[in-house]
Image (spheres, helix red, strand yellow):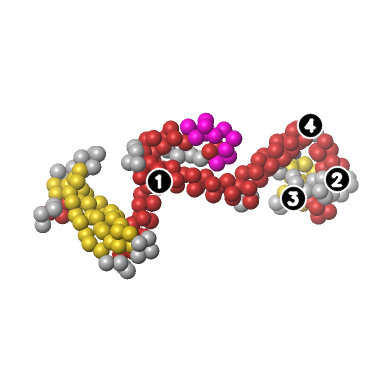
Amino acid sequence: MPPKRKMRDDWLANEDFSPWLSRVEGDPEKALCNICNKQFNAELSTIKRHKTRKAHITNEEHWLQNREELRDHRDDQPENLHINKGVALATILMVYFIAERNLPFTIADHLVELCKVIFPDSVIARGSCLKKTKCTEITKALGKCVTNELVGKLKTHKFSVVIDESIDVSTTKCLTVIVKYYDFEASMLKTGTLELLNLYDNDTMCWINGGPFT
Ligand SMILES: [Zn+2]
């Protein structure tokens, strides 16, 4: 009985086999096709025969197609980086638009879909995805950024504080803390909302921290 062949490095390096051929752990007499997930004898004639099999050819075509699609969608591709930045900016501007005009967050569900219909040739519109929950979370994050910027200004600018009690659309009682200061860079008087404190806990029906009169 002739000695069995063992896997050779030059077969693994051969560009005809390298995309799919690999060793079988612990069995040097076997070869593995990663695409078909099939083992066979580590013989050159067997490897060549596997490459010509119809099932392998079909599997390799699908594998190459998937690899191309994955490459196209990889975030670090220069073209995709440009699109991702555009999508991120478009998302922030849409959230900013909704928040600034006090529109309901549920409008986000329809706004993005509308943009996709209006701009069918835009890859940024096609790549955008914004629903109510995401819109709410981005608004909170943007709100923190705006507050941090305002706090930074107040560290170097004199300001006055105005407080007022208000009720939001969900009838939650709030204490609004507004600051007024003169912005030297913009050469104008500015007003900003520093904090919005909930005063009344609707679940326990109690004032939080003793309410506004303590
Ligand atoms: Zn195969």
Residue bearing mark 4: 54
Give amino acid for label 1: Tyr
**Residue 184 versus residue 1 in the image, above or below:** below
Foreground label between 1 and 2: 1
**Image x and y of residue 89, in percent:** 49, 48
Residue bearing mark 2: 44
Question: Which of the numbered marks, if any, corresponds to residue 96?
Answer: 1
Taking the view exactly as shown, the residue that stands out farthest to the front is: 187
Dots 2, 3 in contact, CB < 8 A = no
Work out whether mark 1 precedes mark 2 in sequence or the reverse, and give the earlier one. Answer: 2
Rounded to the nearest angstrom, the CA distance separating label 1 from label 2 is: 63 Å
Foreground label between 2 and 4: 4
**Image x and y of residue 24, in percent:** 72, 49
Dots 3, 4 in contact, CB < 8 A = no
**Image x and y of residue 177, in percent:** 23, 55
Residue 71 position by quadrant? top right
Span highlighted in magenta in the image: 113-124
Rounded to the nearest angstrom, the CA distance separating label 1 from label 4 is: 55 Å
Question: Which of the numbered marks, if any, corresponds to residue 23?
Answer: 3
Q: Is residue 30 visible?
A: no
Rounded to the nearest angstrom, the CA distance separating label 3 from label 4 is: 22 Å
The answer to whether the beta carbon of the residue marked 2 is less than 8 Å from any atom of ligand 1 is no
Work out whether mark 3 precedes mark 4 in sequence or the reverse, and give the earlier one. Answer: 3
Q: Residues within 10 Å of mark 1 (few under 14, many from 20)?
A: some
Depth order, front residue of 138/158: 158
Work out whether mark 3 precedes mark 1 in sequence or the reverse, and give the earlier one. Answer: 3
What kind of element bears circle 2? helix
Q: Residue at x 43, y 32 (%)?
A: 110
Depth order, front residue of 74/142: 142
Q: Residue at x 61, y 44 (%)?
A: 73
Q: Main secondary structure of the magenta part?
A: helix
Foreground label between 3 and 4: 4
